[in-house]
Amino acid sequence: MGERNAFKALIIGGSVGGLAAAHELGSVGADVAVYERSAGRTEPRGAGIVMQPEVEMLLERLGSSARSVSVPLHERQQLHIHGEAERYKAPN
């Protein structure tokens, strides 16, 4: 495999497509950031960027695991329309 060229990538949208793009870009050496936007608190849904059970099952069928393509979430940050930021601990 050749030398990696470092570059930055910004992914807007943490859906399956956005996370897959981030994973692939990261695998070729990109410094990747993923942003997800939500009108309200994301707590009732788990997180703005979350591994859904269907995606986990698909990964298992493909011979991979959720742990191999994800990281634990310890804290959330919500950016409000007027620029204020709120940080809170993620539920276990």
Image (cartoon, helix red, strand yellow):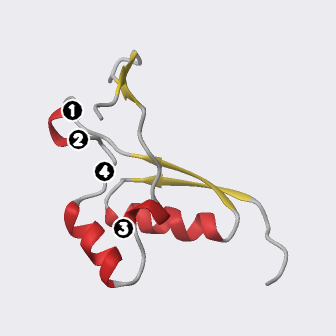
| Residue holding disc 2 | 46
Q: Amino acid at mark 1?
A: Glu
- How far separated are the C-alphas under marks 4 and 2? 7 Å
Question: Is label 2 in contact with label 3 (beta carbons under 8 Å)?
Answer: no
User: Residue at the spot x=33%, y=30% of the render?
Assistant: 90
Q: Amino acid at mark 4?
A: Val
Q: Secondary structure at mark 2?
A: loop
The spot of residue 77 in percent (x, y) is 40, 27
Q: Secondary structure at mark 3?
A: helix
Residue 79: quadrant of the picture = top left
Q: Amino acid at mark 2?
A: Gly
Q: In the image, which disc is placed on residue 43?
A: 1
Instruction: Specify whether 57 is left or right of 87.
Output: left
Instruction: Specify whether 60 is left or right of 42.
Output: right
- How far separated are the C-alphas under marks 2 and 1? 5 Å
Q: Residues within 10 Å of mark 1 (few under 14, many from 20)?
A: few
Question: Is label 1 in contact with label 4 (beta carbons under 8 Å)?
Answer: no
User: Residue at the spot x=67%, y=71% of the render?
Assistant: 28
- How far separated are the C-alphas under marks 3 and 4? 13 Å
Question: Is label 3 in contact with label 4 (beta carbons under 8 Å)?
Answer: no
Q: In front here: 69 or 85?
A: 69
| Residue holding disc 4 | 50
